[in-house]
């Protein structure tokens, strides 16, 4: 029996190692699509969930936030665990947990069970996300092909984020709210056996014990920080916000000190001493910080100022998604032509230009302006994130690929949370003063209207008459003014990102050690802890659409201006 099992395992391993790397990419992209869709699909189902389960305000908040909170806090834990026990193994376990949690969420009959199910979905997502990037790093050792693969990967992420609300809306029109979770199960039933057969197993350096205490410390610290940042974004400044933030920062500092003392750290923090790696992480944080909060404000502008329906709002934002997809697919060619430094700086500048262009938005609809601004915004943002992710992943050692991918995804989540908090605060600071002295409006009504534009409309409707109309007009004018101020602050952050990107390498370097072993098959994973053979000079097979001349470079060189060995 044991001999048969061993032989079957060897056959599966050989099938995975010999699988066409582009087929492997398809499997990884399906995994990513599922996680990206699930992050946004619940948003349109919140009213139906509220009507059916009758959750309280705090319970509803946890139903929405449990998934991103748990996922963000566990990325480093499962990313580094995959480096130790096997990335495919963690990915397949993530598939299984995601399917089980989806069924649990679909048939939840009370709010607490749904919160637990959403938290389990976050655990499954944290297993899947870094594993897809780290397996991609291993399957595509040639940097030019890897750049194309990352472009496709990031385009799929953009599609998933956009498809989530549309899919959720379609399902809710025909089925009950649980169907937004139930749709995950067929995909998991397909992905699990396909992934087991096709995906190659790989590990990093497994010397020394896995730092369980460090992993739990990082998870607890990130959970507390992300929770505090989310509460800041909601405008809450009390002890329930500041205590988690302070505790999270303390835990993360302890985690860093622990990693520096250990002979076999959970994360090799020396990666951050490489300018290309640390700069890429900073660019990811800054890009998300500048834009995620802005996206939420833009959605309010389209619905509350221009009076568009949710469907019309979604359609106005579709060009942004298509532009991001185009940038992802063209990213490999741009990276090869311009290099990381110019590509990321150009992406930041394009995005800043789009943000400045959108300051021309006013109280009236200007569809051509919005179309041009959103297209430029989507293309510039994806160009920035593509170049930063590719540089970060290429700079990290292969045996630390899971940890590096987890750092990138965590940076994305933290940047998004901080952006909502920061730009939301800027928006409120610019919006509220315009409602302090509206003729005919009582001070109490003005104070309530200063909380948000939606609340201002409710107060205006209750007041009625000339005072209500005056408050409504003042609120719209103040919101547009606040939007302009927020756009200018975002543009400043983006230009700071363009300056930061000047620390990236000038050229895209491709080492001969990073070439694939054959024209169509992924390399067989090296035994755990083994070093690559020195002196190999394999020739890179060209990535589709990137030309046919292989790029030969010396085995060791200095990154331009950085002094880092690549």
Image (cartoon, rainbow, N blue to C red):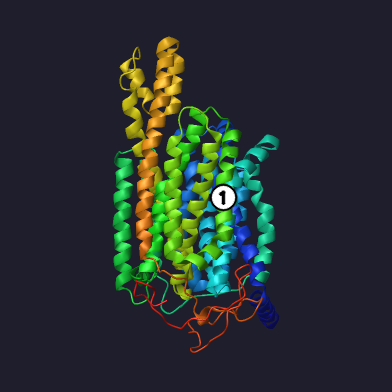
Mark 1 burial class by Cα count in 10 Å: few <14, some 14-19, many 20+: many
Residue at the bottom extreme of this rendering: 535
Reading the image, the residue beneath label 1 is: 323
Residue 77 placement: quadrant: bottom left
| Image quarter of the N terminus | bottom right
User: What residue sits 53% from the left and 60% below the top?
Assistant: 129
Where residue 478 appears, as percent x and y from the top left, is 38, 27
Query: Where is the C terminus found, in terms of image quarters?
Result: bottom left
Front residue of this view, candidates 265 and 139: 139
Query: Judging from the image, what secondary structure is the residue with disc 1 in?
Result: helix
Q: Position of residue 394 (x, y in %)?
A: 47, 70
Which corner quadrant of the image does residue 473 belong to? Answer: top left
Identify which residue is drawn at 63% across, 67% down.
545
Query: In the displayed structure, does residue 217 sit left or right of residue 351?
Result: left
Instruction: Give residue 111's position: percent from left, percent from top.
Output: 53, 39
Q: Which of the 4 quarters of the picture holds residue 452?
A: top left
């Amino acid at each position: 029996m044991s001999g048969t099992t061993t032989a079957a395992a060897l056959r599966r391993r050989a099938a995975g190692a010999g699988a066409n790397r582009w087929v492997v990419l398809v499997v990884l992209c399906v995994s990513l699509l599922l996680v990206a869709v699930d992050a946004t699909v619940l948003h349109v189902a919140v009213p139906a969930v509220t009507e059916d389960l009758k959750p309280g305000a705090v319970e509803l908040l946890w139903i929405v936030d449990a998934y991103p909170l748990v996922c963000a806090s566990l990325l480093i834990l499962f990313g580094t665990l995959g480096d130790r026990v096997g990335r495919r193994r963690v990915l397949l376990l993530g598939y299984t947990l995601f399917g089980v949690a989806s069924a649990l969420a679909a048939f939840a009959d009370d709010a607490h069970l749904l919160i637990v199910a959403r938290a389990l979905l976050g655990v499954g997502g944290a297993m899947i996300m870094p594993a897809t990037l780290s397996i991609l790093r291993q399957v595509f050792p040639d940097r030019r092909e890897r750049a194309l693969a990352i472009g496709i990967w990031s385009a799929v992420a953009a599609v998933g984020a956009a498809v989530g609300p549309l899919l959720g809306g379609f399902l809710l029109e025909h089925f009950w709210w649980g169907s937004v979770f139930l749709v995950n199960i067929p995909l998991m039933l397909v992905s699990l056996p396909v992934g087991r057969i096709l995906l190659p197993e790989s590990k990093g350096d497994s010397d020394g014990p896995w730092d369980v205490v460090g992993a739990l410390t990082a998870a607890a610290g990130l959970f507390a920080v992300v929770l505090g940042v989310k509460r800041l974004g909601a405008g809450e400044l009390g002890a329930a916000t500041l205590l988690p933030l302070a505790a999270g920062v303390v835990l993360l500092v302890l985690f860093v000190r622990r990693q520096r003392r250990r002979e076999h750290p959970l994360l090799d923090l020396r990666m951050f001493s490489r300018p290309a790696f640390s700069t890429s992480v900073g660019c990811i944080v800054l890009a998300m910080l500048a834009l995620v909060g802005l996206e939420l404000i833009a959605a309010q502008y389209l619905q509350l100022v221009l009076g568009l329906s949710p469907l019309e709002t979604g359609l106005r934002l579709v060009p942004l998604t298509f532009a991001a997809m185009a940038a992802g697919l063209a990213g490999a060619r741009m990276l090869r032509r311009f290099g990381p430094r110019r590509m990321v700086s150009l992406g930041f500048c394009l995005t800043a230009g789009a943000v400045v262009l959108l300051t021309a938005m006013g109280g009236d609809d200007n569809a051509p302006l919005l179309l041009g601004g959103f297209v430029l915004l989507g293309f510039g943002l994806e160009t920035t994130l593509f170049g930063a992710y590719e540089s970060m992943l290429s700079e990290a050692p292969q045996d630390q690929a899971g940890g590096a991918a987890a750092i990138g995804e965590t940076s994305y989540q933290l940047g998004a949370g901080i952006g909502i908090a920061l730009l939301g605060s800027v928006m409120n600071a610019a919006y509220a003063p315009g409602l302090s002295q509206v003729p005919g409006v009582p001070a109490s009504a003005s104070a309530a209207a200063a909380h948000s534009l939606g609340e201002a409309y409710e107060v205006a409707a209750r007041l009625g008459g000339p005072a209500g109309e005056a408050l409504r007009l003042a609120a719209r004018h103040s919101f547009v003014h606040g939007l302009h101020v927020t756009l200018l602050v975002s543009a400043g952050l983006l230009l700071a990102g363009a300056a930061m990107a000047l620390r990236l390498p000038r050229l895209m370097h491709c080492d001969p050690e990073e070439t694939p072993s054959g024209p169509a098959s992924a390399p067989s994973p090296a035994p755990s802890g083994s070093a690559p053979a020195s002196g190999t000079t394999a020739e890179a097979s060209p990535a589709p659409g990137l030309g046919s001349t292989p790029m030969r470079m010396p085995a060791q060189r200095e990154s331009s201006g950085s002094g880092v060995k690549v």
